[in-house]
Image (cartoon, rainbow, N blue to C red):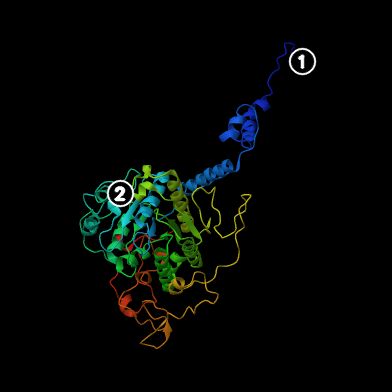
Amino acid sequence: METQEHTSGHHAPNPAHTLFRSAEVEGDATGIAKTGLRGGLNRIGFKLQPSAAELQARERVSALESARAVILHSAFTRPVGVLIANPKGTSGKTPATLGLASAFAAVKGNGICALEVADDAGTLALRAEGAPQLDLGDLVRDISQIRSSGQLAGYAVQQSSFVDVFGSRPGESRPALTAEDVVGVSRVIDEYYRFRFMDSGNVVTTGPFLGAIDVADVLVVPVMMARDSGLKAIEMLDGLIAAGGHAAELARNAVILRMTDGRPENTDDRADVVRYLKERGGARQFDIPFDPHIAERRDITWAKVSQATQEAFTFAAAEIVRVVRGEQPSTTAVRPGDAAAVPDTQDDEDPDGAVPAVDPTPTPGPVSAVAATQAPVVPSVEPDPREDWVTCPECGERTPPATFCAFCRHQLTETVNLQRFYGRARRASGYAEPAEDLPEQLRALPKPTSDTDTGRASA
């Protein structure tokens, strides 16, 4: 039976066309400008393509959404420790600690804490919101009495970003921390928090720093773009690489935060610092822009930090997750205002906005910090990596300047490197028995006697 045609001039809508109309309109809209003059003209009937600035803004929004998704979906079977370190003072360690922790908390909510691991009282609580009633010194004293998250929270100050800060009472001293203090506090904190951000001091040869290295999964190095800050960071990375093992692994996968506090920067010095850090494996470099609120050197409130600075910390926070996952660097640098992660190499920027290809050639070996201070560029002839080796008084062999001789295991220094004490399998959230390759007198140390002392095995 034939159907009658409508004679009124109105036709029944095509169901398929109606169903997919909104998607078609949305798909067409992505190719036209929505902001600025072009966007205004498009709203009255034109169909102009977006400008380069609008495309860049769209790409940055997309990259930021991806970074937040990486943070949100980060799930590990054990807590994660992040150490923020640079032996040069005023390099931005404390703002970086609070900024990274807040970037995580802004996406994941609670379960994020910041912990002071400096030898003496630092400025973490001073730069945080509020003053602690019980501080880190009290927590170290009472650590064996902690039985619940509510009890532990009494030693912290919660921020408006939902980060819990464990620091020292401003204007008061506390007993100096030891390596055992850092290890013990970290072990208890890991029972109740998912991410632990550790703000270190300015000395990298003492117990607290060695203990923090041992309980860290990721190393973050904030660097001001000046020779003094850059060279101290290089010295620290060189020392960790020379120590080998877990310490070297942290150094080679370090996340570099290129900080600025408003002081003038020398272009040549900046280029040198970036280059020297890359030579030590610093492929994960991020620029943190100048922020007036942070520059006030008062309490840091995440909501008052500029959007550009919040986004920069978010990109760096996502890179921390990638390090823990064992993934390759997502970027060489992210600069303020960049659309996305773009490799930061000299003369590689395409005027058309194309992203240059990543150079597959390996980076050259590191240059010593002493050589770096004397040369504006990397010397063509690299120094002998064994020039800093020492002669073991026991066996007479030349060995790296570590805690123990690489040949006879004779102890070379009075300071014991804790990262050699524990096997890699139980690092960060639990602590294994001394490694089998240690001398007899060290393997004879007392073993844990309770279940709470043995720690948890990592994933």
Q: How many marks do you count on the picture? A: 2
Q: Earlier in the sequence, mark 2 or mark 1?
A: 1
In this view, the residue farthest toward the right is 2
- Name the residue beneath numbered marker 2: 298
The one of 341 and 132 positioned closer to us in this rendering: 341
Q: Residue at x 46, y 53 (%)?
A: 316
In contact (CB < 8 Å): disc 2 and disc 1: no
Is label 2 in a helix, a strand or a loop?
loop
Q: Look at the image and tell me in which quarter the C terminus lies.
A: bottom left
Q: Quadrant of the rendered structure where residue 25 is?
A: top right
The one of 162 and 268 positioned closer to us in this rendering: 268
Q: Is residue 276 above or below residue 392?
A: above
Q: Is residue 147 above or below residue 422?
A: above
Q: Is residue 42 above or below residue 232?
A: above
- Can I make out residue 446 in this image? yes
Q: Amino acid at mark 2?
A: Arg
Mark in front: 2 vs 1: 2
Query: What x and y, as percent, mark residue 64?
Result: 50, 46
Q: CA distance from mark 2 to mark 1?
A: 79 Å
The one of 282 and 296 positioned closer to us in this rendering: 296
Q: Residue at x 33, y 43 (%)?
A: 160
Q: How would you rate the neighbour count of disc 1 (Cα within 10 Å): few for under 14, some for 14-19, many for 20 or more?
A: few
Side (left or right) of 356 relative to 140 = right
Q: Residue at x 26, y 63 (%)?
A: 177
Q: Quadrant of the rendered structure where residue 427 is?
A: bottom left
- Name the residue beneath numbered marker 1: 3
Query: What x and y, as percent, mark residue 60?
Result: 53, 45
Q: Amino acid at mark 1?
A: Thr
